[in-house]
Image (cartoon, rainbow, N blue to C red):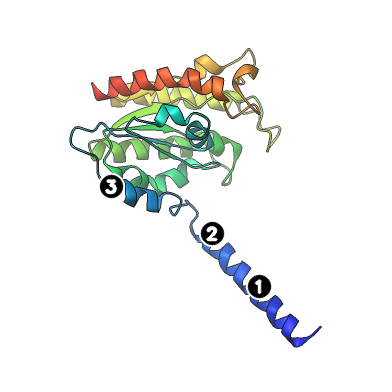
Amino acid sequence: MGTKILIKLVFMNTLLMSCFEMNAQDWANLERYRAENVALGQPAKGENRIVFMGNSITQGWIEKRPEFFANRPYINRGISGQTTPQMLIRFRQDVIALHPKVVVILAGTNDIAGNTGPSSLEMIEDNLASMSELAKENDIRVVLSSVLPVFDYPWKRGLKPANKIIALNTWIKNYCEKRGIIYLDYFSSFADERNGIKAALTIDGVHTNVAGYKIMEPLVEEAIQKALN
């Protein structure tokens, strides 16, 4: 192998390793919305800004139903694949710093799937509680959403998540009642007889389709109005 070729290969390997290291360091993907947050600026006087914090279901919402977010003060801060500890890390940057009136949190299913390692229900609950408490401390009203039903994760088969999701949703509902937070129940509208998601409302047994988002939209708008009032 020639010296020039060897030098090129070493250079390319160094460059790739640097890129991987940078991505690994930004575990919570803080870079994803950093520039958009700066460009967004502060809310206008009288603006009831709403931030949607979540995972791929939230991200997919603006991708599949952009008209729902258009001409509304709705800011989508969903990142595909994320778990609650990642969202907690970016909560100040992607929620608090934007000064919304309300934050809508939809999170927890990827924790149950083990996307960032094993997570107990208590760990998920702690992270949801921490996000809610941070919001309330900063005069942001909270809408805490139920996790959508899942019978099996296509990328990690055999975890049997249905009962864990039901248990987590029970905790979320009880926590909301104790803390004076709005509980948003998506689960009841989506669950089938197996406590998975209805086939007509999903693309893969986890992620909702356009029909599913159309069901979610009036539910979330009702919850937002309750929070604002």
Image point 54% across, 59% down: which residue?
A: 23
85 to the left or right of 137: right
Residue 12's disc is 1
The quarter of the picture where the C terminus appears is top left
222 to the left or right of 165: left
Residue contact between numbered discs 3 and 2, judged by CB atoms under 8 Å: no
Image point 55% across, 19% down: which residue?
A: 211
Q: Position of residue 188 (x, y in %)?
A: 50, 15
Residue hosting label 3: 41
Q: What residue type is labelled 2?
A: Asn
Which of the two discs, 1 and 2, labels the residue nearer the N terminus? 1
Does residue 186 show up?
no
Which of the two discs, 3 and 2, labels the residue nearer the N terminus? 2
* CA–CA distance in space, label 1 to label 2: 17 Å
Residue 23's disc is 2
Q: Where is residue 148 in the image (x, y as percent from the top left)?
A: 53, 25
